[in-house]
Amino acid sequence: MFLLLSANAQSSDSLKIFSADSNIVQDKRVNELVLKHVLINEARKGKIKGYRVQIHFGQEKAKALDVKSKFMAQHKDVPSYLDYQQPYFKIRVGNFRTKLEAYKLLQEISGDFSGSFIVSDDIELPEIE
């Protein structure tokens, strides 16, 4: 099989690929989009869309760390995360694939962490057992 690449002089935005059994015309920007897609996937490596329970939102880092410590002492098996989005500190807990799983934790902690709610977030991939 042989390939012949040709750039059209009138349209510099497209690339023509000729082969013995096909003729493909491809815009040069397709490669840029593919590269962008690859970079986005690499940035999200090890993460998927899921849910967490947000238990704190405030401007004081010390208060956020206190809330996180309190949660970790009571729920050692549930991961917790400190997220800073200027000027707010957020404490989010859990890695849930479904909203129902997150809701179960929300019901357990609602007495100790009032005002908690479920948020959509990128979560860590669950471990395969």
Image: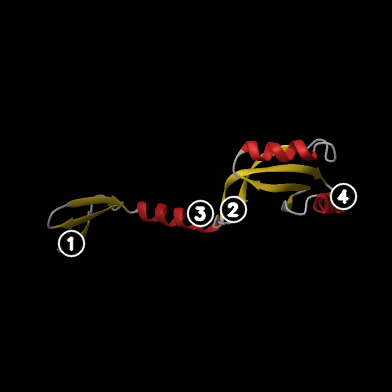
Residue type highlighted by circle 4:
Lys
Secondary structure found at label 4: helix
Which label sits in the foreground, 2 or 4?
2
Residue under label 4, please give it.
63
Q: CA distance from mark 2 to mark 3?
A: 20 Å
What amino acid is labelled 2 in the image?
Pro
> Disc 3 residue type?
Ile
Do tag 4 and tag 1 residues touch (Cβ < 8 Å)?
no
Read off the residue under disc 3: 40
On the image, the x and y values in percent for residue 104 come to 70, 38
Q: Quadrant of residue 99?
A: top right
Q: Alpha carbon of mark 2 to alpha carbon of mark 4: how far?
A: 29 Å
Residue at which label 2 appears: 126
On the rendered structure, is 94 left or right of 26?
A: right
- Secondary structure, mark 3, is helix
Name the residue: 62% across, 50% down.
Answer: 123
Residue that numbered label 1 is attached to: 4
